[in-house]
Amino acid sequence: MEGTDGFLYFLLDEEGRGSLWKLAFDEALTPVDPVRVGALPGLGVSLARDPIDGNLFALVRTQTGDFVVVELSRAWMVTSENAPSDPTEGPRLVFSLERWQRALEEGAVETTTLPFHPSELPVRMSVLRTEELDFVSFDALGALYMGAKRANLVLKFDLPRPSGRYTVGLAAGVVERGVGLTPELRMHAWKKVAY
């Protein structure tokens, strides 16, 4: 993933723990030795750059099996490079799939905001319990997508700006599961969930 600073960034698995690395090129466009930027809170799965502010976001699978999205801000990257041994300062958590599912199951979401009858919630949630999440991406307008290619599952999130506080949910977004252009499941207008 190309960063706004001209470096190429990539994720690396270091004995089950993910880390962010950067790669530069010299004047002859020959790559120089990569540099480790910092550790992730689990195994790095996918990397994307926010087209609005240029920050990198990573989809990470934690040791507990949760999938989280973390913001790898430029400030975090500078701090991590200068103090790579400090484990207390990690990237900022933006979204946790486990926490989001739990909030739905515990009724923390108004049932009137669900695009289906509340009795269908267990069936709908079982579709979202996938261990195949494998990408995070942005569109040109800054909406965040997370999904599983093999399961044909896509979650779309809106990140409000410029408040600095991310609200992650399915407001005006879509969760799809299906084949091609005929998804088996399409959910619209979920209430926003703040993290």
Image: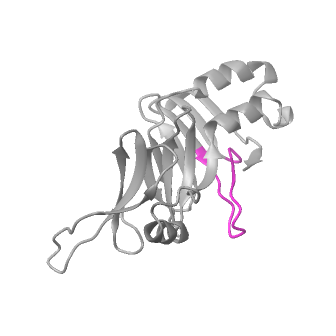
Residue at image point 40% right, 38% down: 16
Which of the 4 image quarters holds residue 98?
top right
Residue at image point 56% right, 57% down: 90
Tell me if 178 is positioned left or right of 28 in this view.
right
Tell me if 26 is positioned left or right of 71 in this view.
left
- Asked whether residue 115 is in view, the answer is no
Task: Indicate the position of residue 182 as horizontal and vertical percent values.
Answer: 51, 29
Tell me if 111 is positioned left or right of 78 in this view.
right
Decide whether residue 159 is among the magenta residues: yes
Task: Indicate the position of residue 140 as horizontal and vertical percent values.
Answer: 50, 62
Main SS of residues in magenta: loop
How many numbered circles are shown? 0
Q: Quadrant of the N terminus?
A: bottom left
Task: Indicate the position of residue 130 as horizontal and vertical percent values.
Answer: 53, 27
Decide whether residue 125 is among the magenta residues: no
Which of the 4 image quarters holds residue 22?
bottom left
* The one of 139 and 30 positioned closer to us in this rendering: 30
Q: Residue furthest front?
A: 85
Figure coloring: one colour
Relative height, residue 140 to residue 174 (above, below) = below
* The one of 118 and 125 positioned closer to us in this rendering: 125
Residue at image point 85% right, 36% down: 110
Task: Indicate the position of residue 72 as horizontal and vertical percent values.
Answer: 51, 61
- Asked whether residue 159 is in view, the answer is yes
* The one of 140 and 42 positioned closer to us in this rendering: 42
Relative height, residue 4 to residue 140 (above, below) = below
Magenta residues span 156-172
